Amino acid sequence: MKRFALLSFLLAASLHAQTPAPAAKPAPVPKRAPTIANVAYGTHERQVLDFYKAESAKPTPLLFFIHGGGWVNGDKSGVGELEACLKAGISVVSINYRYSYQAQLAGVMPPVQWPLEDAARALQFVRSKAGEWNIDKQRIGASGGSAGACSSLYLAFHDDMADPKSSDPVARESTRLWCAAVTGAQTSLDPKQLIEWTPNSRYGGHAFGFMDPNDKKTRDTRFAEFLEKRDSVLKWIKMYSPYELVSKDDPPVYLLYSSAPAIGQPQKDPTHTANYGVKLQEHCREIGTECELNYPGTPDVKHKSIAEFLIETLKK
């Protein structure tokens, strides 16, 4: 019996010795620190941005990044395409902005005014720093995901908001973009369009006050009311929905989605469905604006990624 136990022990030890130890996990790559952090472009605590400088003897193009989070969450720290852009000689700015529920609590209507106007103001501020930060103020491309994508498209399609007669030098700067490349974008804020494109749509009402600002969980719970009262906010939809702002002189945009579209059918993730992209691309083609769409299974994709589009467009 003792002999059997000894043999079992030796066999187990031999097998253990032959089993290779699991490979050590690579150490996490530390996040790159901004060249300049928390630069204020306004007086609110959320009106700050980070600047990442690409080393270059001549002015660099710029990626202007707007974080997602439905305009009620999120932070500037997670910058998409940061390393790829810096490696390509493109500097990067990532912004925070005032949330829509904060606007609602302050009595501002529509609440979407704050995040979108902050994006425009931050862009103007960055242009005012072009000489100091070695930026080519013409070649600025916006990017972001979800609400950050919607904000980027708002800037891409909106007429220039510069006020050349302003006593404020920042306000005199342009808000126009060279391009925009976004992921999971909400291309429309019109509930009538959304319910036609995607029957189980639920997003967008909070942009116009259909939300309890003291409870962020109510953000997507009042879509039926939003649709019912659409006419009461239609003037604001026309002002802030990217779809409504498209014109022939707008810069090229690139739309990336993680699933294939199905127009008129319920979607697993209606807030980030490629249905948004299909309909915006159709609209842009009718008007004559360049709009590239990429989703799984897209035929003849010209640019496989946001980084590829941004680098080629900003550097050419």
Image (spheres, rainbow, N blue to C red):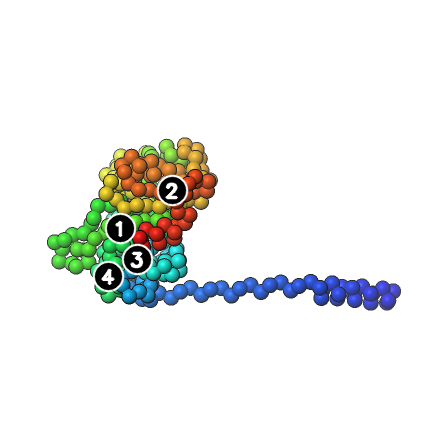
Q: Which numbered disc flags the more N-terminal residue, 1 or 3?
A: 3
Q: Which residue does the numbered mark 2 point to in the structure image?
A: 293
Q: Nearer the viewer, residue 316 or 226?
A: 316
Q: Position of residue 313 (x, y in %)?
A: 32, 51
Q: Nearer the viewer, residue 104 or 82?
A: 82
Q: Which numbered disc flags the more N-terminal residue, 3 or 2?
A: 3
What secondary structure is found at the residue carrying circle 3? strand
The quarter of the displayed image where residue 18 is located: bottom right
Q: Which numbered disc flags the more N-terminal residue, 4 or 3?
A: 3
The quarter of the displayed image where residue 20 is located: bottom right
**Left or right: 18 in relation to 248:** right
Rounded to the nearest angstrom, the CA distance separating label 3 from label 2 is: 22 Å
What secondary structure is found at the residue carrying circle 4? helix
Q: Residue at x 86, y 67 (%)?
A: 2
Q: Which numbered disc flags the more N-terminal residue, 2 or 4?
A: 4
Residues marked 3 and 2 touching at CB (< 8 Å): no
Rounded to the nearest angstrom, the CA distance separating label 1 from label 3 is: 10 Å
Amino acid carrying mark 4 in the image: Ala
Q: Nearer the viewer, residue 13 or 222?
A: 13
Amino acid carrying mark 1 in the image: Leu
In the rendered image, is residue 209 in sight? no
Q: Which residue does the numbered mark 1 point to in the structure image?
A: 177
What secondary structure is found at the residue carrying circle 2? strand
Q: Residue at x 31, y 42 (%)?
A: 290
Query: Which numbered circle lies on residue 122?
Result: none
Amino acid carrying mark 2 in the image: Leu
Query: Which numbered circle lies on residue 62?
Result: 3
Q: Which residue does the numbered mark 4 point to in the structure image?
A: 130
